[in-house]
Amino acid sequence: MGTGEQQAPVITIDGPSGVGKGTIAQLLARELGWHMLDSGALYRLVALGAARQGIPLDDETALADYAARLPVEFRAGEGATHGLAIYLDGEAVGDAIRTEECGAGASRVAALPGVRAALLARQRAFRRPPGLVADGRDMGTTVFPDAPLKIFLTASAEERARRRYKQLKEKGIDVSLAALLEEITERDTRDSQRSASPLVPADDALRIDTTSMTIDEVLQTVKQAAAPLFAPRD
């Protein structure tokens, strides 16, 4: 890692699925004029690529090898989610990696130490001047433990299921709220109990319960915490 990368500041935003990490990270990065890392996308890409290549999601050695050479490209703009278009083997997969099935697969591969180790250097390479906003589940504890500002977002499982239900319904996807709640609860358990980089707040993280907050209220809270450290661009 070069000197510039070491000195580039980082704001980490961690938490379980459905708390608004990606949206908050995108809005904050845009205001600061910083780079953004959607670490969850990397694990979803591994899960998607593995499914397409017939790699079992419990074959840690094969998955780690695939993760180490993950043929992914992030392109700015192009009307993509979080401001980035995501390509796997040259194919745009921004929508494909956001399915419930892919999310469940990502949670499984993310529990494998070999996969996490293979993606660690790739995630840290996103740290470039003028700074980075990184969202995920272990950004503040494992990937960027020296980040000067660490945020940990939470919300009740019921509220997160309702949010996801609303999102899917708006896309015309027929889903069961009860099934979504069960899946979220199972994913929380798997993420928090895994041996490799479990989902836990960093000791020095600012914890924000977003259950009854709007996105704008959460963003303002995060910006207030960041104000003493970083000055948004004009």
Image (spheres, rainbow, N blue to C red):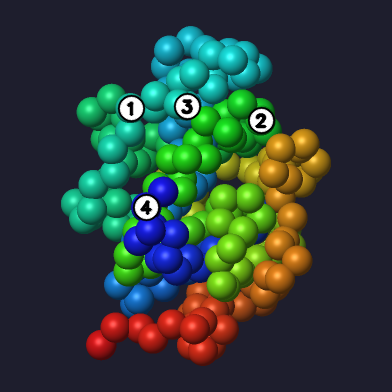
Q: Residue at x 57, y 84 (%)?
A: 225
Q: Is residue 110 above or below residue 160?
A: above
Work out whether mark 4 precedes mark 2 in sequence or the reverse, and give the earlier one.
4
Question: Exactly how many numbered labels are in the figure?
Answer: 4
Report the residue marked by disc 2: 113
Label 4 close to label 2 by CB (< 8 Å): no
Which circle, 4 or 1, is nearer the viewer? Answer: 4
Distance between the alpha carbons at the discs numbered 3 and 4:
23 Å
Report the residue marked by disc 4: 2
Q: Residue at x 56, y 56 (%)?
A: 144
Q: Residue at x 71, y 37 (%)?
A: 196
Badge 2 amino acid: Pro
Badge 4 amino acid: Gly
Distance between the alpha carbons at the discs numbered 4 and 2:
26 Å
Label 2 close to label 3 by CB (< 8 Å): no
The answer to whether residue 126 is left or right of residue 109 is: left
Q: Is residue 159 above or below residue 60?
A: below
Badge 3 amino acid: Ala
